Image (cartoon, rainbow, N blue to C red):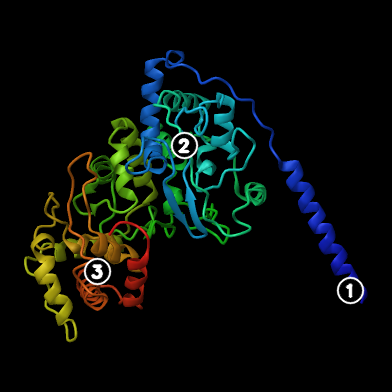
Amino acid sequence: MRLLRFGLCFAVLLLVAAAFFVVLSRQPVIAGVEAPPRSAFDQTLIEKGAKLAAIGNCYSCHTTRGKADYSGSRAIPTPFGTIFSANITPAPGTGIGRWPEEAFRRAMREGISRRGEHLFPAFPYDHYARLTDDDLHALYAFLMTRTPVESFTPRNALPFPLNKRWPLAFWNVAFLDKTPFQPNPQQSDAWNRGAYLVAGLGHCGDCHTPRNLFSAEESSRPLEGGAESEGWVGPALNTASPAPVPWDEAHLFTYLRHGWADQHGAAAGPMQPVVTALARADDADIHAMATYLAAQQGPVSTERQQRASAALARAAEVKPPAPAAGEELGATIFAGACASCHTGSAAMVPPHGINLALSSALYQPEPTNAIQFVLRGVQPSGERSGPLMPRFADTFTDAQMAALLRYLRAHYATAPPWHSLESKIRDLRQRKGPL
C-alpha cells in the first residue's frame, strides 16, 4: 500500500512538473506589422534569397499543384499522419504578411510561429537553426516579395495527442540543437560551404539520416540513410552508400545539377523536385555540396574498388543474363519491358536508361525504392527535359513485379534475395500519391 501511494504521488508530481514546464515553455506573441513593400528590399538581396530558397526547396513543400506558388496546403505524409504546409506568401491574413523579420527568424531557428505556437518538425527548423542572419534576411526578402495569396491551410490529420502542439516543447528540449554552424578550419572553403548547405538549408538529413522512435534524426548517424519520405527510402550518403560504383565529386555535381549521372542513374520520387529546384541555384553552391558529400563517402577500399569493377563489367554485357531455374517469368518480363533501355552500354545518355548493374536501388538492403521505380517510373518535372521511364503500376501484377525484381536483384546486384516482395509491393500500391 505504501509503495502504491508513493507511486501515485510520484505520478502526480510528474504531471504537475510537466504542466509547469509546458506553461513556462509558451512563447510570446510577436506583434504583427504591415507587410513591407517590395521597394524595401534590394533586388540583389531578393535574388540571393531566391537562390537560397531553391537550395531549401521551399517551393516544393509550400506549393500545391494547381494553386498559387508558396500558398501552402500541400499534404505531407509522415509516419504519424498528414501535415499540411503553411501559406508563406506575404498575404496578411493567412500568410506571413504581418510577420516582422524577428518572427521569421524565430520560426526558422526555433519552430515557433509569430503567434507563439509550436510548428511541427515536418518543417525542418532543426536544420534551419544553423542558418546565418544574412541568409535568413535574404530568404525573408524573397518571401516577402512573392505574390500575396489568401489561402487557408486544411487542418492536419494527426491522432491525439500528436495533433496538439504543446508536446513539441518536450521534443525541442530533447532534439533541437540551435548551435550555429561552425566551419572546420581543417577543411577547404568549398567543403565548409557544402557542409553548411547540406546540414542547414538543404536539410539533406531529413531524408538521408535514420530517425528514432520520436521521429528525430539520430545525430550520431548523419547521412546514414534509412528515413522514409513519401513512400521512398533515402539511401545512405556516407560510407554506407549502396551505390555499386562509389560517388565522386564530378558525378555528384552532375546528378544534383541535371537529375541524373552516368554510373548512378536518375533522380526519382522526392528527390526529383529537389534537383528541379537546385537548377536555380549557383554552380558554386552545387559544387560545394558535391565536394562535401563526396568527402562523406570516405576512402575507397580495395574491396569496394573490386566490387565497382565487377559491377561495371556486368554493365558492359550486351545480352541480359540467363535466368536460373524458376526465374523464367522475371527474365521474360525484363526482356519484353526493360531490356531495350537498360541493357548494353554503361553510359547513361537520356533517354537511354542506366544499366541496372549500376542501379543503387537494386543494391539497397530492402526493396522499397526498386519497387517504386517500377510502379511509378520517372517523369520529367515539366519545367525541363530529363530521363523518362514509364510506370508499370497498371501493367504488372504483384506476382509479375516480384518475379522481375527477384531476377534483377539476383543477376544485376548479385545480392541475397529480398523477402516478402509481394506484400511490400501490395503495400506500396496502396500508398497515397500519383501512380
- Tell me the SS state at disc 1: helix
Count of numbered circles on the image: 3
Q: Give the residue type at disc 1.
A: Leu
Q: Position of residue 297 (x, y in %)?
A: 36, 51
Q: Quadrant of the C terminus?
A: bottom left
Q: Could you give the CA–CA distance between mark 1 and mark 3, rounded to whole angstroms?
A: 59 Å
Label 2 Cα crowd, 10 Å radius (few <14 / some 14-19 / many 20+) = many
Asked if residue 144 is positioned above or below residue 206 in the image, the reply reads above
Q: Residue furthest right?
A: 2
Frontmost of labels 3 and 2 is 2
Label 3 Cα crowd, 10 Å radius (few <14 / some 14-19 / many 20+) = many
Frontmost of labels 1 and 2 is 2
For the point 8% across and 63% down, the residue is 340
CB atoms of marks 1 and 3 within 8 Å: no
Residue under pointer 3: 413
Res 365 seen here: no
Q: Earlier in the sequence, mark 3 or mark 2?
A: 2
Tell whether 202 sits left or right of 372: right
For the point 32% across and 67% down, the residue is 429
Q: Position of residue 65 (x, y in %)?
A: 33, 44
Res 195 seen here: yes
Q: Quadrant of the N terminus?
A: bottom right
Residue under pointer 2: 87
Residue under pointer 1: 3
Q: Give the residue type at disc 3.
A: Ala
Q: Could you give the CA–CA distance between mark 1 and mark 2, rounded to whole angstroms?
A: 53 Å
- Tell me the SS state at disc 2: loop
- Tell me the SS state at disc 3: loop
